[in-house]
Image: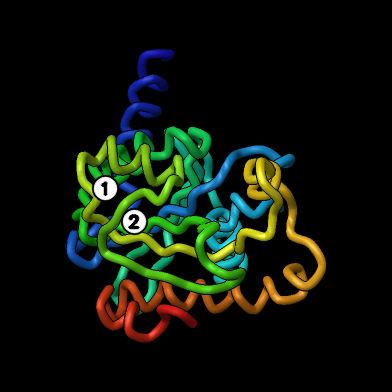
Amino acid sequence: MFSIFRELFTINSNRNLTDGDPMKKYLIVGLGNIGPKYANTRHNIGFKILDFLAEKEELTFESKKLGDVTVYKLKGRTFLLLKPSTFMNLSGKAIKYWLEKEKIPLENLLVVTDDLNLDFGTFRIKTKGSDGGHNGLKDAQQVLNTSKYNRFRFGIGDTFSQGKQVDYVLGEWIGEEQKLLPERIEKATEIIKSFGLAGITNTMNSFNGK
C-alpha cells in the first residue's frame, strides 16, 4: 500500500503544471526572501508584485519544489508565477528547475526584481545586461550561463547613507513610498500581462521609464 502512495506522490510531483504550446507559456519569477520578517521589505518587491496579481485574479500559491507557484491563464497564454524558496542569493536554481520542468523557452522568462539604481517606482525592462550588483540576478546568470534573459527592474531608490545599503534594501517601505506603492504594484502587473500578450519589445516601449 505504501508503495502505491509513493508512486502516486511521484506521479503528481512530476506532473507539469502547465500544458499546451511552449511558445505560449511564460515563467514569471518574483525575487525575494522567504519568511514574514522580509515580507514588506524593499528587496521583496518581486514577491509583492506576484502576490498582488495572484490576489487580484483569485489565485493561490502552492509550495512546490524550490518555490511557491501558481498558474495564471489569460487570452490563450499561460503564466507560471514563481516565488523561489531558495532565498535571494540562490534564485538561479529555482529558475532553471522550473524552466526545464515546464519546458518553457528562455525567451519566455521574466525575472522581477528591485533596483537601487532607479528612483522609487520607476520601471526598467531589458532583454539582457549585467547583474548590476544584485545577488539574485548574479546567481541566475551563473546558473543559466547567460546574461541574455528578460528582467523587469522596479526602482527602490538609494536614499541611504554610506555603509547602510543592506539595511536599506532589507528595510520596510516608509512614508510616501507606502502611499504610492499600491498604484506602482498594480501598474507592474500590467507589465507582466503585456510581456505575454504583446511581447518584450512592445512592453519595453510602453513601460520603460514610466
Q: Decide: is 66 above or below 106.
A: above
Q: Please provide percent x and percent y for residue 186.
A: 58, 76
Q: Amino acid at mark 2?
A: Leu
Left or right: 176 in relation to 134 = right
**Furthest residue toward top:** 2
| Residue 137 coordinates in the image, percent (x, y) | 39, 46
For the question of whether residue 39 can be seen, the reply is no
Query: Does residue 207 appear left or right of residue 129 in this picture?
Result: right
Q: In the rendered picture of this protein, how many numbered marks are placed on residues?
A: 2
Q: Nearer the viewer, residue 120 or 67?
A: 120
Q: Residue furthest bottom?
A: 206
SS of the residue at dot 2? strand
In the image, residue 204 sits, relative to residue 13, either above or below, namely below
Q: Is residue 75 above or below residue 80?
A: below
Q: Quadrant of the N terminus?
A: top left
Viewer-proximal residue, 17 or 182?
A: 182
Query: Mark 2 and 1 residues: CB-CB less than 8 Å, in contact?
Result: yes
For marks 2 and 1, give the one nearer the viewer: 2
Mark 2, residues whose alpha carbon is within 10 Å: few (<14), some, or many (≥20)? Answer: many
Residue at 44% of width from left, 56% of height from top? 81
* Residue 131 at x, y percent in the picture: 36, 49
Q: Quarter-wise, where is residue 159 in the image?
A: bottom right
Q: Which mark is on residue 41?
A: none
Left-right relation of 178 to 46: right
- Marks 2/1: CA–CA distance: 9 Å
| Secondary structure type for disc 1 | loop
Q: Which residue is mark 2?
A: 27
Dot 1 corresponds to which residue? Answer: 102
